[in-house]
Amino acid sequence: MSKIIENPQQLILSKAKEILYNEGYQKLTMRNISKACEIALGTVYNYYPTKKELVIDMMTDHWQKFFYSIESVADLDSTLYDKLNMIFNELSFFIKTFKALWLKPELYDNPDYVESGIEEEINYMERLIVFIENILVKEIEANKVKTKLDTYEAAKFIVMNFITIIQMPVFKYSSFEVILKELIY
């Protein structure tokens, strides 16, 4: 009698992450995932026909957790700058973790992963821009702030500077906030 697994796709993702994080990309095989999950190899292939699809889904899950971590920031009773600082801190942690887990030569030796990863990154950057734009719109509608820029352009400016500060920490967040207060006041 076969056992019933409540959420096999989540189990596969979870075990695949464990293998990748603990043993490395070379050990991330469908057979090893099948063994770790104690399910048939065919079941793994039913959910993930290729290793590439599995890896992209794992990256996507990592991004989803980041967005889950910042969702509550939009509704906090804080200043815009406090909210942006919280988002910056979460993004900083996310990017450092992402680099450690996903930006490894073994993953990026394959051009398929690079291309798919860049496509996903662009989609998630756009989602982050829209998330920040929505916060700006709420703040403007509540007459808490005004901006010299269109809200979408302001949100893009914020996100791109967040990433630059995280990647090249020669420029401090506090200095960026001073400039930002000139644009959004």
Image: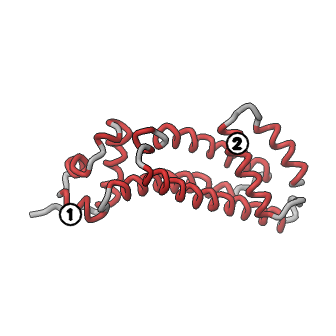
Q: Is residue 7 visible in the rendered structure shown here?
A: no
Horizontally, residue 110 falls left or right of residue 37, namely right
User: Of discs 2 and 1, which sits in the foreground?
Assistant: 2
- Give the residue displayed 36% in from the left and 56% down from the top: 54
Q: Which mark is residue 107?
A: none
- Horizontal and vertical percent for residue 8? 29, 60
Q: Mark 2 = which residue? A: 164
Q: Is residue 156 left or right of residue 18?
A: right
Relative to 59, does residue 7 appear above or below in the rendering?
below
Residue name at image x 23 percent, y 46 percent? 32
**Of all residues shown, which one is farthest toward the top?**
170
The amino acid at mark 2 is Thr
Location of mark 1 (residue): 4
| Residue 5 in picture, x, y percent from top left | 24, 61
**Amino acid on which the number 1 mark rests in the picture:** Ile
**Outermost residue toward the left in this view:** 1
The relative height of residue 114 versus residue 92 in the rendered view (above or below) is below
Question: Which of 51/18 is in front?
Answer: 51
Q: Residue at x 74, y 31 (%)?
A: 170
Q: Residue at x 39, y 52 (%)?
A: 55
Label 2 SS: helix
| Residue 26 visible in the snapshot | yes
Where residue 25 sits, quadrant-wise, is top left
Quadrant holding the C terminus: bottom right
Q: Is residue 137 left or right of residue 86?
A: right
The answer to whether residue 52 is left or right of residue 119 is left
Whole-angstrom CA distance, mark 2 to mark 1, is 47 Å
